[in-house]
Image (cartoon, grey):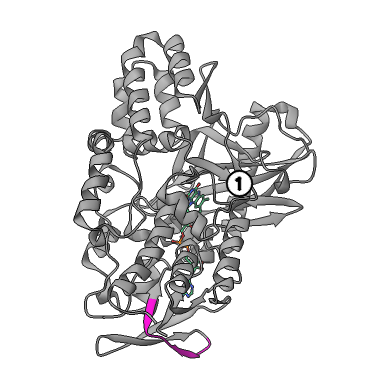
């Protein structure tokens, strides 16, 4: 039986492991951290659970290929309750409350009522959302392994959606909002994603929600990966945690083993690195092996990360929406100035807080220069790193209280994370929470195979191969690596 060594136990690694076992390989996962899950995680502070990943999960609609994959891996089971809210997000702007409702007709109607001068642009936006609801993510097998007729059927079924992707993918959100006259509407449309993202990202994200395909699995991110780990182990897979891999040992174009950081050498027939490629091609293998296209993306594309603050609240927060944005006194986080804050309310899942209480979170987009700010502080002035993190969290709290004075005396900071936190815990490149910023240049970037020139048995299985990253890309890239090994003729 061929033996596969999987490096990293995040979404990609767990999915790779489950499919390796299903296909008759013997596999082992080596995870650096003390728990599996990688970025798909959560933790508890002062009795409050901070669910730190799933805001929405593409593939919760049952008749999709993606749902099938989630079901095959136990990420979603028949018993998993899917939570859907009324609105994707809500913005308070210029005294108005505007929402991206689940019901697109309600969104259309309310927006036209509020901004009749923008009727044409609103109608075009909603039409684009409705068409995008039909877009499918190909997760059955890698596109280059797909039989030609299947590829054709897939392309035909998504023709309208693909045309739309070309049109809106080519413009940034900042450019897209120029179609609207109302400054309030412009603010509303830029609350959810940064202006540098492609307009298609906004349309497709909202469409995933309105298409009933972007719900939230009850129990949260950590429970989801625990189900997957259990499934993997039930199929005979072995997980080693607190087991950082130090190198992949290549001799004559063949990787015959890995060495763990404690010096132990483990041999395998195939190696599937699912950790961040910035680690694979610096610590584990020579940089020269990095696929050229991937190296170019790391050179030319930007990464998005977040600064986050979590709050524990002695109130059920029923007066808050799931996700809301409002004006705030300007403040600077590293190099980024904000004038609006987003607050997410986690009271939809009672298991996250004691009865009658709730968790709230704020997060602010951070770019490369912000990451460098946090990295520099952490490495050179640890005390200031912590005091700055704390100062910003306090400033956020002050702004939340200005908006919601009824929370006075009931809300406290329970944790905060910088982009560097993600780098420290899972090795995320520049603290990236998915992969590269989904800008117009990125929308059309093709998925990469993960094959490595000059090494015949290392198959990358990471979210960084497929835009825009996120759980579905991580899972499918992990699965695809195993399918490629199988297609190459290996097996029992
Ligand atoms: C705040 C936040 C919110 C998010 N929200 C969503 C969302 O709503 N929907 C969505 O789809 N996605 C979301 N994501 C993105 C999603 O979490 C990631 O895309 C996904 O978890 C990435 O999985 P991965 O396995 O590719 O990588 P990772 O999760 O980074 O896993 C890689 C693993 O490799 C391990 N590793 C690193 N180096 C080594 C080594 N040397 N040896 C062994 N192991 C190693 C790491 O510890 C890690 O566990 C969010 C992410 C964040 C941070």
Q: How many marks?
A: 1
Q: Which of 190 and 80 is in front in this view?
A: 80
Classify the position of the N terminus by image quarter.
Answer: bottom left
Q: In which quarter of the image is the C terminus?
A: bottom left
Residue at 51% x, 43% y is 56
Between 284 and 469, the one lying in front of the other is: 469
Residue 373 appears in the picture as rendered: no
Classify residue 295 by image quadrant. bottom left
Rendered position, 454 above or below 13: below
Which residue is depicted at the point 54% across and 73% down? 235
Is 423 displayed left or right of 303 in the figure?
right
Judge whether residue 262 can be spotted in this image: yes
Q: Which of 229 and 172 is in front in this view?
A: 229
Depicted 4 relative to depicted 49: above or below: below
**Residue that lies at the very extreme toward the front in this rendered image:** 149
- Span of residues in magenta: 262-271
Q: Where is residue 308 in the image (x, y as percent from the top left)?
A: 56, 47
Residue 342 percent across, percent down from the top left: 55, 35
Q: Quadrant of residue 324?
A: top right
Q: Please give the residue where the numbered disc 1 appears in the rendered image.
A: 309
x 37%, y 29%: residue: 129
Q: Would you say residue 343 sits in the magenta stretch?
A: no
Dot 1: within a 10 Å radius of its alpha carbon, few (fewer than 14), some, or many (20 or more) residues? Answer: many
Residue at (46% x, 32% y) in the render: 210
Label 1: element kind: strand
């Amino acid at each position: 039986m061929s033996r596969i060594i999987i490096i990293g136990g995040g979404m990609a690694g767990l999915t790779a492991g489950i499919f390796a076992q299903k296909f008759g390989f013997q596999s082992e996962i080596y995870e650096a951290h003390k728990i599996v899950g990688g970025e798909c995680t959560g933790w508890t502070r002062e009795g409050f659970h901070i669910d730190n990943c799933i805001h929405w999960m593409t593939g919760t609609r049952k008749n999709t290929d993606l749902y099938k994959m989630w079901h095959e891996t136990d990420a979603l089971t028949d018993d998993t309750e899917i939570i859907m809210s009324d609105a994707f997000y809500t913005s308070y702007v210029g005294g108005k409350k505007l929402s991206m409702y689940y019901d697109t007709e309600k969104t259309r109607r309310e927006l036209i009522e509020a901004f009749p001068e923008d009727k044409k642009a609103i109608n075009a936006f909603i039409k684009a959302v409705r068409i995008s609801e039909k877009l499918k993510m190909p997760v059955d097998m890698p596109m280059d392994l797909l039989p030609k007729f299947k590829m054709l059927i897939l392309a035909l079924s998504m023709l309208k959606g693909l045309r739309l992707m070309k049109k809106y993918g080519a413009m940034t959100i900042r450019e897209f909002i120029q179609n609207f006259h109302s400054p309030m509407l412009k603010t509303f449309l830029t609350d959810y994603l940064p202006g540098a993202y492609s307009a298609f990202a906004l349309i497709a994200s909202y469409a995933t929600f309105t298409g009933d395909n972007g719900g939230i699995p009850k129990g949260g991110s950590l429970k989801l990966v625990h189900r997957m780990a259990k499934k993997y182990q039930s199929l005979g897979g072995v997980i080693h945690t607190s087991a950082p891999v130090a190198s992949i040992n290549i001799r004559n174009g063949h990787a015959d083993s890995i060495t763990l950081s404690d010096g132990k050498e483990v041999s395998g027939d195939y190696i599937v690195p699912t950790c961040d490629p910035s680690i694979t091609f610096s610590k584990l293998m020579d940089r020269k092996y990095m696929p050229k296209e991937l190296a170019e993306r790391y050179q030319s594309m930007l990464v998005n990360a977040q600064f986050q603050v979590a709050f524990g609240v002695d109130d059920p927060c029923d007066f808050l929406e799931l996700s809301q944005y409002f004006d705030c006194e300007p403040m600077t986080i590293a190099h980024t100035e904000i004038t609006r804050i987003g607050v997410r309310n986690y009271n939809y899942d009672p298991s996250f807080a004691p009865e009658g209480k709730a968790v709230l979170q704020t997060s602010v987009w951070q770019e490369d220069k912000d990451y460098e700010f946090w990295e520099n502080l952490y490495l050179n002035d640890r005390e200031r790193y912590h005091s700055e993190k704390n100062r910003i969290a306090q400033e956020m709290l002050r702004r939340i209280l200005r908006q919601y004075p009824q929370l006075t005396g009931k809300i406290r900071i329970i944790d905060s994370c910088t982009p560097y936190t993600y780098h420290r815990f899972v090795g995320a490149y520049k603290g990236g929470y998915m992969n590269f910023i989904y800008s117009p240049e990125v929308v059309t970037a093709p998925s990469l195979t993960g094959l490595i020139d000059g090494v015949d048995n290392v198959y990358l299985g990471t979210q960084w191969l497929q835009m825009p990253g996120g759980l579905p890309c991580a899972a499918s890239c992990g699965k695809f690596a195993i399918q490629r090994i199988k297609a190459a003729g290996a097996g029992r």
